């Protein structure tokens, strides 16, 4: 039972490589958020889904970042042509009422 | 735009003692939500306590309590009887509505010393 799960937990990518990060929200939670957390900093908002609709993508740093949630459950964050500044922990959260529940994150290191 | 400030990058406390973490925020909203999240070294973000701005009573969760000063836009966290397991990063966070994103402060690293 579960909480929010994310995979992989760790990902090492060569610069220029594409990566895909997966998030499984808590069952029944319609809202899903992605955040980026740089080392030693607080998480920063990337994008938000309600069911399959992406309602806010204002935090995506560039057009290399793309997120989807085609069936309103699992979500994937894709980063194309990764760059060193993309190295961070990517957190997924799903929401019930006012509270967001976070997954363990995916730590991405771009070499 | 809303901002959240935590002026204490690092703090330490003796086990069993009490510690207070500070947080201030800036918003023009009247109704909103405030949170304290804990992120231990394993990096799983855990909700510690939540406060609705329309409630005057300060929230309490066991050893954790807040001092919410709406006019001053201040939201401090008090941890009583500190335990070694309280060692973590603590993030103060703001949310405008229940359908909005969470805005986090930069965090305070708390170390509980045996």
Image (cartoon, coloured by chain):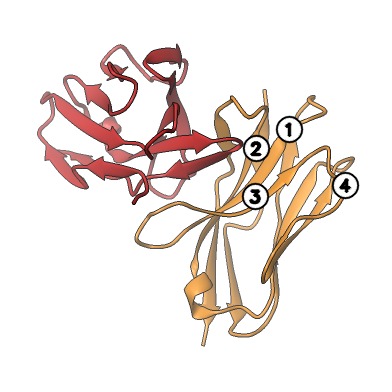
Q: Are marks 3 and 4 in contact (CB under 8 Å)?
A: no
Quick one: label 3 or label 4, which is nearer the N terminus? 3
Tag 3's secondary structure?
loop
* Residue at 16% across, 28% down: A19
Q: Gap in Å between the C-alphas at discs 3 and 1? A: 18 Å
Name the residue carrying label 3: B6
Q: Which chain is red?
A: A
Give whichever of discs 2 and 3 has the lower sequence position: 3
Residue identified by numbered label 1? B32
Q: How crowded is mark 1: few (under 14 residues within 10 Å), some or many (20 or more)?
A: some
Q: Mark 4 points at which residue?
A: B56
In the image, taking residue B51 as reference, residue B73 lies left or right, namely: right
Name the residue rendered at 43%, 29% in the picture.
A33
In the rendered image, residues at marks 1 and 4 fall on the same chain: yes
Q: Provide the chain ID for the residue under circle 2.
A: B
Mark 2 or mark 4, which is nearer the start of the sequence? 4
Q: Where is residue A1 in the image (x, y as percent from the top left)?
A: 34, 51
Marks 1,4: beta carbons within 8 A? no
Q: Which chain is orange?
A: B
Q: How far apart are marks 1 and 4 (CA)?
A: 13 Å
Q: Name the residue under label 2.
A: B94
Q: Is residue B97 visible?
A: yes
Q: How far apart are marks 4 and 2 (CA)?
A: 17 Å
């Amino acid at each position: 039972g579960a909480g929010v799960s994310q995979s992989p937990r760790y990902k090492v990518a060569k610069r220029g490589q594409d990566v895909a990060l997966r998030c499984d929200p808590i069952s029944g939670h319609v809202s899903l958020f992605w955040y980026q957390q740089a080392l030693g900093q607080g998480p920063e908002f990337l994008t938000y889904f309600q069911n399959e609709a992406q309602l806010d993508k204002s935090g995506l740093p560039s057009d290399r970042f793309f997120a989807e949630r085609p069936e309103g459950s699992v979500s994937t964050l894709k980063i194309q042509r990764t760059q060193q500044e993309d190295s961070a922990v990517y957190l997924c959260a799903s929401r019930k009422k006012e509270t967001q529940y976070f997954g363990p994150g995916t730590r991405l290191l771009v070499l | 735009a809303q901002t959240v400030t935590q002026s204490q990058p690092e703090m330490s406390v003796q086990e069993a003692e009490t510690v207070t973490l500070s947080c201030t925020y800036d918003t023009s909203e009247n109704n909103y939500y405030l949170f304290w999240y804990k992120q231990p070294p394993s990096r799983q973000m855990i909700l510690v306590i939540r406060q609705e701005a329309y409630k005057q009573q300060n929230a309490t969760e066991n050893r954790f309590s807040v001092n919410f000063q709406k006019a001053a836009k201040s939201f401090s966290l008090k941890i009583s009887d500190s335990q070694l397991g309280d060692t973590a990063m603590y993030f103060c966070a703001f949310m405008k509505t229940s359908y909005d994103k969470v805005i986090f402060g930069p965090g305070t690293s708390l170390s509980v010393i045996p």
